[in-house]
Image: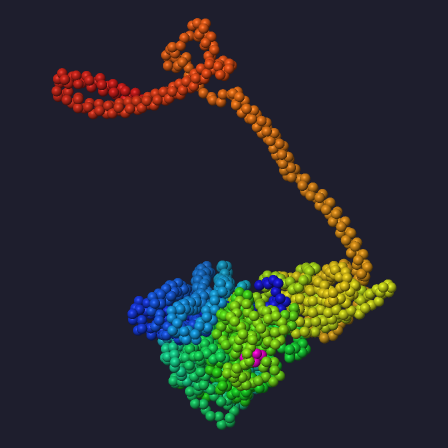
């Protein structure tokens, strides 16, 4: 994630989020399978509870008259069952909301009869909708997982059982069929684990909204329960505020979760995708390579190209194990999750009695002879032999087989090469890593243990089940009620004296695997815990209640007095117990919850377990039920440097403090804090010491009578165990709630120191980014502050040292309160950095005082011990402090604008000037997890380039990219051996150039000085040298990502030398892989304002700075080129040195050989007169250049204008103008003509505008063939004159108003009317003709049909009756019908 415009202190800081559930689902671990079963059981319980609650609400609404009888049952069902763990919903806020609701429900319902009718919409409908939508989808997803898992297991077993004689093509088809089933199974698992946190949040949202809405309705109904509501109003409002905060960031969390799910799902599918090459299916287990009997050859085994060989000596995954069962004995291949870790080989099994994970026996790798088994019928088998057991295992692919054998070989090499192994073995010490590699040992925690070795030997029979449980736990919540408490026994850890023996021979006998040991190591399960009322068997029964745990077996008295005292009773706090001000009574949700997760907390608190004193980490059985099959806890360190008290020591040890997050708290030096801790009764951590031949435990195993193998675990005396390996016991004054939190705290933070105890826990939210709030717990120890959050499937763990915090201030709000942890000052811009934490249910005033007390105690010269700290914290509850204006005089403050009043140091500055600690979040989407100790070396560069602009009014002078990493370029420019800046000053004619070492300023900042003599010219022209001292400061040193160095120089060549400085900020940022960008920003820093002409000097100084920056970039490019192509960071560090390691001042001693660059700025001293003259000349040149530029611009414009297209466009414009002119002119002429015509028309002179045809009487004779009854034109001379006078052709020649003209006009109108009539007559005639013709045709056709009908009748009658009448009828018929037939035929033709 690249970030832009961030403060220099936050550049490159990454906060790691770990999707633990998705990672476990991607590798299909036993923890993931156990989690699926756990959630399935929890969902059934939840569905049952919700259904009963909905039914109770329905009954309440329906039977309002019997409301009083139903109330007790309804209120009882509104309390969350204790069998539902914190993995299903939040116990801090959701359960508290339900509890507060229950407190006021009894008083409230008496006045809520009217509200009862609305229960269906407030309770029943949301629950039914939740059951039908969210819960049904969740159950369908769970069923899909079960179906896919069953199909996948069947196909995998079938594929694993295929023999070597199968055809490659058939094997390939089976492989792809198995892969498709695996894809469906992985997708179902990923869908399930991505839906689980969403389901959990939906459940929280449903419950909080449902109970909040009911609570609000109750509050509004009556005022007679005001006292009850007054006690819970603030808490309910805060719980609602918590939900609002969570809803605001839910969308971002969900998108991140789905993105991680998609990537992990694709990675899991790609890793298990089979090959399409037939040659790959011809491979099988290769024959055993000749050589040593205990070595396995992997030289001929082919490795998968998808995977890289791991050299960590650790591996885990599914293997098929050959077991024997039944009578007669038969071979059964079962699938088991195996691991090689910390020098031991073992199995993790899903518990058959509870949804949890159990651990089997552990076999030391130095006792294992691992080699391929080519004689087996199954493919990819390998054999694991010890001196007593032969175990046959099968991998899924050839590459997996190679990886397993390599992991065993690497683990053996590490165990043998361990420098502490042989000396510890010889002295009988307690290096458990070396001892575990040499022994076959029982699981560290028997309650999470199972036996598996007994089922791998022939003849096991029915008396030895395949999964024999020696230490199993019942399902929680089945024996006892919620309020019961039981005394539980603790495993006896008394140490026995072991006789001195020849340890050298014993070591050689263990290392020599070719011969049997003189005294064979006996293997048997550890003794079971006695089934007593106070035994471990009742551990889970009351896992949600108060459970005191104490010794139930009598301990053998020790006469010597060397053994530790037995631990005091451990009691797990009740969920509904009133919370202490030091810690809540509820536990946090673990990353990978199972039914045994709470048992892990109980066992940790009972036995004082913590991470093992060697490299083995926490026991695998506890680890698998808390974090999964591998511990993915990554603690992000928030402070940038150690405390001021250790700055000098840090500087001597390492002059370049690392700014990367640490996976564990920094190892503290010997301080009075440790010595001030009270001496507690220690207990040994784990019973994993070296097994002695022939030795056995004091308590015989019950299975010894059945002649089974027994496990021999050595005991060492308490005198031989150093105090560093022991865990102090809880003091008597330690609060009960804090004990429970401390036990879980050690599981959530595996890197915790053993002598660290919790002193305070509170619920809070923290937002490392602007849009995401992480709800969780803040754990406070005397040394550090830890933050843990598991929200929507993403786990965040971070910490900050108390001595890195200046003070804690607070600000109250309406929906939440704010705690501000001010970090030590020393940032680049001088502003304070702070961490803002939101609290909802904690006493703000008391919390602030306690935090300040712990901060002061951590930096004190004589810090208090644990007892004094606890007494002081408890005493603060009853003390009445002075009135604090930062807490009690505030009104309600909006949570969006937290204002920090600060303490004495911060009240002098603005209260809101603190810079919030922000960092981009990176979701860990790697399928396989690396070791915690190796996280830093596996730093992954961001995919996008880092963008950074320094704050302030700076001008970018130059920037350039280089083909080397940002870290390499940083060492090239600022390494202890780099002479780049000295060369640059030498080119400026400086002499006696000395470069000082980098000195730490704290907070990761360094400073060094450069002194030299610079040439100057006096007023008389005499040249002299002036001593100049410049310095550089490293502001940001974010490894591999961003480096910012400020270079401040004295302007010895400019006027007002003492009034200003030349400031250059060199910024080196990561651009891509093996690429970086160098940018130089410049500005002028005025120390005192210039009297006159300051602008002229500043302008020249900026110009010189830009030229100097370009020269610097050229010189850097020259130095980088000397590294050669494909430069590596190690080579740059080797040549140019580290940063801050040297303590000597270096002086440049070189000849006059010039550097391979050409300086852009010559080293000349400038006077004020010269600057003015240069300014005037520059102004004149600028004016001339402006005029010339304007002229050239006009010419260029013309040249661009006179192109073909623009000429055509200009011609078009001219044509349009020309046509417009002519159009205007013609239109004007027409207008004038029109006005003249209208004027003439008014005078009576106008053309005839009607076109018509007149029919005269003479024409009528021709049309109608009838005489017009008018005289002929030549009938008489008088008539001819009349005719000529009224002739239509000449009538218009005369006067228009003459009688003849009037006659002619009348004739014209009559003729026009006559023509219209003639046309109408013709049309009428045509219509009448058509009408008659159509009627005629129809009539003829009808008559023709009648004639046909009559024809038969007439002819028949005539043949019978021949009379005169018939003859007439015949004649008529012949004449008439024949005529009709002829007419009909005419019509037809």
Query: Is residue 692 or residue 467 the one in the foreground?
Result: 467
Residue at (42, 15) in percent of width and height: 1256
Rendered residue at 75%/73% (across/down)? 1145
The answer to whether any part of residue 1276 appears in the image is yes
Q: Examine the residues drawn in magenta and state their main secondary structure.
A: helix
Q: Inspect the magenta stretch and tell me whether residue 851 lies in it.
A: yes
| Residue 988 vertical placement versus 679 (above, below) | above
How many numbered markers are drawn?
Answer: 0
The type of colouring in the image is rainbow
Image coordinates for residue 961, horizontal then vertical, percent: 67, 60
In the picture, measured across the screen, residue 595 lies left or right of residue 252, that is: left
Q: Which quarter of the figure is the C terminus placed in? A: top left
Q: Let me know if residue 1326 appears in the view.
A: no
Q: Quadrant of residue 804?
A: bottom right
At x 37%, y 79%, the residue is 481
Across and down, in percent, residue 88 comes to 43, 71
Residue drawn 44% across the image and 61% down it:
180
Quadrant location of the N terminus?
A: bottom right
Queried whether the magenta region covers residue 927, the answer comes back as no
Q: Is residue 828 left or right of residue 597?
A: right
- 690 or 724: nearer the viewer: 724
Name the image quarter holding residue 1264.
top left
Query: Picture coordinates of residue 140 (x, y %)?
Result: 39, 64
Where residue 49 sits, quadrant-wise, is bottom left
Relative to 142, is 291 on the left or the right? right
Q: Closest to the observer: 884 or 1222?
A: 884
Q: Position of residue 583 (x, y in %)?
A: 49, 78
Magenta highlight range: 850-855
């Amino acid at each position: 994630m690249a970030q832009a415009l961030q403060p220099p202190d936050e550049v490159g800081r990454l906060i790691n989020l770990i999707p633990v559930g998705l990672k476990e689902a991607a590798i299909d671990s036993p923890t993931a399978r156990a989690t699926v079963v756990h959630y399935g059981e929890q969902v059934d319980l939840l569905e049952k509870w919700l259904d009963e609650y909905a039914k109770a609400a329905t009954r309440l609404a329906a039977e309002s008259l019997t409301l009083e009888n139903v109330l007790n049952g309804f209120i009882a069902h509104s309390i969350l069952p204790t069998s539902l763990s914190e993995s299903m919903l939040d116990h801090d806020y959701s359960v508290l909301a339900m509890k507060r609701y229950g407190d006021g429900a009894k008083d409230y319902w008496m006045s809520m009869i009217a509200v009862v009718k609305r229960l269906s919409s407030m309770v029943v409908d949301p629950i039914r909708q939740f059951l039908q939508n969210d819960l049904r989808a969740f159950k369908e997803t769970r069923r899909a997982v079960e179906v896919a898992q069953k199909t996948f297991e069947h196909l995998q077993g079938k594929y694993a059982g295929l023999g070597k004689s199968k055809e490659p093509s058939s094997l390939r088809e089976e492989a792809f069929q198995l892969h498709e089933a695996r894809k469906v199974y992985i997708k179902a698992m990923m869908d399930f684990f991505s839906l689980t946190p969403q389901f959990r949040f939906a459940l929280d949202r449903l419950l909080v909204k449902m109970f909040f809405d009911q609570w609000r309705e109750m509050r509004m109904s009556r005022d007679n329960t005001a006292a009850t509501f007054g006690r819970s109003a603030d808490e309910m409002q805060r719980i609602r505020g918590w939900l609002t905060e969570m809803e605001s960031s839910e969308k971002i969390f969900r998108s991140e979760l789905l993105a991680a799910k998609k990537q992990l799902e694709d990675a899991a599918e790609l890793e298990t995708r089979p090959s399409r090459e037939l040659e790959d299916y011809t491979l099988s287990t290769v024959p055993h390579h000749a050589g040593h009997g205990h070595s396995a050859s992997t030289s001929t085994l082919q490795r998968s190209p998808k995977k890289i060989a791991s050299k960590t000596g650790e591996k885990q995954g599914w293997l098929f194990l050959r077991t024997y069962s039944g009578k007669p004995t038969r071979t059964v291949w079962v699938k088991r999750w195996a691991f090689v870790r910390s020098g031991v080989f073992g199995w993790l099994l899903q518990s058959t009695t509870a949804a949890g994970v159990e651990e089997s026996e552990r076999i030391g790798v130095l006792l294992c002879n691992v080699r391929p088994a080519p004689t087996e019928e199954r493919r990819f088998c390998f054999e694991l032999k010890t001196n007593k057991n032969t175990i046959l295992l099968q991998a899924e692919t050839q590459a997996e087989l190679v990886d397993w054998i390599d992991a065993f070989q690497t683990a053996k090499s590490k165990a043998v090469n361990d420098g502490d192994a042989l000396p510890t073995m010889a002295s009988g010490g307690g290096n458990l890593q070396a001892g575990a590699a040499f022994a076959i040992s029982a699981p560290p925690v028997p309650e999470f243990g199972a036996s598996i070795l007994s089922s791998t030997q022939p003849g096991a029979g029915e008396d030895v089940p395949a999964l024999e449980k020696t230490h199993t736990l019942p399902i929680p919540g089945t024996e006892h009620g919620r309020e019961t408490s039981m005394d539980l026994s603790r495993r006896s850890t008394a140490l026995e004296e072991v006789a001195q023996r020849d340890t050298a021979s014993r070591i050689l006998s263990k290392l020599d695997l070719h011969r049997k040991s003189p005294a064979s190591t006996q293997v048997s399960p550890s003794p079971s815990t006695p089934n007593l009322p106070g035994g471990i068997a009742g551990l889970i029964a009351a896992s949600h209640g108060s459970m005191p745990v104490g010794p139930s077996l009598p301990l053998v008295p020790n006469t010597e007095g060397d053994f530790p005292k037995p631990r005091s009773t451990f009691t797990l706090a009740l969920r509904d117990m009133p919370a202490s001000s030091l810690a809540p009574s509820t536990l946090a949700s673990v990353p990978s919850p199972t039914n045994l997760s709470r048992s892990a907390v109980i066992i940790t608190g009972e036995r004082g377990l913590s991470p093992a004193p060697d490299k083995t980490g926490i026991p695998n059985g506890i680890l698998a039920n808390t974090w999964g099959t591998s511990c993915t806890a990554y603690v992000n360190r928030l402070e940038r440097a150690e405390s001021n008290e250790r700055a000098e020591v840090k500087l001597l040890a390492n002059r370049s403090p690392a700014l990367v997050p640490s996976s564990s708290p920094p190892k503290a030096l010997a301080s009075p804090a440790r010595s001030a801790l009270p001496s507690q009764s220690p207990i040994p951590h784990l019973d994993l010491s070296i097994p002695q031949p022939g030795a056995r435990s004091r308590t015989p195993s019950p299975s010894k009578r059945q002649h089974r193998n027994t496990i021999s675990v050595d005991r060492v005396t308490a005198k031989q165990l150093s105090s560093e390996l022991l865990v102090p016991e809880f003091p008597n004054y330690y609060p009960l709630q804090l004990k429970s939190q401390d036990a879980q705290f050690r599981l959530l933070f595996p890197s915790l120191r053993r002598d660290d105890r919790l002193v305070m826990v509170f619920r809070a939210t923290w937002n490392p980014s602007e849009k995401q709030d992480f709800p969780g717990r803040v754990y406070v120890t005397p040394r550090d502050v830890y933050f843990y959050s598991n929200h929507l499937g993403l786990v965040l763990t971070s910490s900050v040292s108390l001595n890195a915090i200046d003070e804690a201030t607070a600000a109250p709000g309406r929906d939440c309160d704010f705690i501000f942890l001010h970090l030590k000052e020393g940032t680049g811009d001088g502003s304070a950095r702070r961490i803002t934490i939101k609290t909802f249910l904690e006493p703000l005033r008391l919390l602030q005082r306690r935090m300040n007390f712990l901060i002061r105690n951590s930096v004190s010269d004589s810090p208090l011990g644990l007892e004094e700290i606890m007494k002081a914290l408890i005493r603060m509850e009853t003390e009445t402090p002075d009135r604090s204006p930062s807490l009690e005089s505030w009104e309600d403050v909006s949570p969006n604008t937290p204002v920090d009043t600060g303490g004495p140091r911060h009240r002098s500055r603005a209260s809101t000037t603190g810079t919030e600690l922000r960092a981009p979040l990176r979701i860990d989407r790697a399928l396989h997890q690396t070791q915690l100790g190796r996280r830093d070396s596996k730093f992954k560069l961001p995919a996008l380039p880092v963008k950074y602009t320094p704050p302030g009014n700076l001008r970018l002078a130059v920037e350039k990219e280089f083909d080397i990493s940002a870290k390499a370029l940083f060492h090239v420019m600022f390494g202890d051996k780099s002479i780049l800046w000295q060369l640059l000053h030498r080119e400026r004619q400086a002499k006696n150039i000395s470069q000082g070492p980098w000195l730490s300023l704290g907070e990761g900042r360094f400073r060094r000085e450069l002194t030299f003599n610079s040439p100057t010219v006096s007023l008389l022209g005499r040249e002299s040298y002036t001593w100049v001292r410049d310095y550089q400061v490293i502001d940001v040193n974010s490894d591999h990502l961003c480096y910012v160095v400020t270079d401040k120089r004295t302007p010895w060549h400019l006027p007002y030398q003492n009034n200003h400085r030349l400031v250059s900020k060199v910024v080196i940022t990561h651009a891509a892989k093996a690429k970086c960008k160098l940018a130089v920003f410049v500005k002028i820093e005025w120390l005192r304002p210039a009297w006159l002409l300051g602008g002229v000097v500043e302008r020249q100084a900026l110009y010189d700075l830009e030229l100097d920056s370009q020269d610097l970039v050229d010189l850097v490019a020259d130095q980088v080129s000397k590294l050669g192509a494909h430069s590596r960071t190690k080579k740059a560090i080797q040549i140019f040195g580290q940063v801050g390691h040297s303590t000597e001042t270096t002086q440049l001693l070189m000849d006059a050989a010039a550097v391979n660059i050409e300086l852009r700025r010559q080293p000349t001293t400038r006077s004020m007169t010269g600057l003015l003259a240069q300014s005037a000349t520059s102004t004149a040149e600028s004016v001339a250049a402006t005029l010339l530029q304007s002229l050239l611009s006009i010419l260029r414009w013309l040249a661009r204008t006179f192109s073909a297209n623009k000429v055509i466009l200009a011609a078009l414009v001219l044509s349009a103008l020309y046509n417009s002119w002519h159009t205007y002119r013609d239109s004007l002429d027409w207008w004038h003509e029109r006005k003249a015509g209208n004027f003439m028309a008014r005078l009576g002179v106008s053309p005839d505008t009607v076109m018509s045809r007149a029919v005269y009487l003479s024409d009528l004779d021709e049309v109608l063939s009838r005489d017009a009854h008018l005289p002929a034109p030549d009938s008489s001379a008088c008539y001819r004159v009349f005719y000529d006078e009224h002739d239509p052709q000449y009538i218009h020649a005369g006067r228009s108003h003459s009688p003849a003209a009037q006659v002619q006009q009348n004739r014209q109108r009559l003729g026009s009317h006559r023509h219209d009539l003639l046309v109408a007559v013709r049309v009428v005639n045509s219509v009448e003709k058509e009408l008659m013709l159509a009627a005629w045709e129809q009539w003829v056709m009808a008559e023709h049909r009648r004639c046909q009908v009559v024809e038969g009748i007439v002819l028949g009658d005539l043949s019978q009756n021949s009379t005169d009448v018939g003859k007439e009828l015949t004649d008529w018929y012949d004449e008439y019908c024949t005529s009709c037939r002829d007419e009909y035929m005419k019509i037809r033709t």
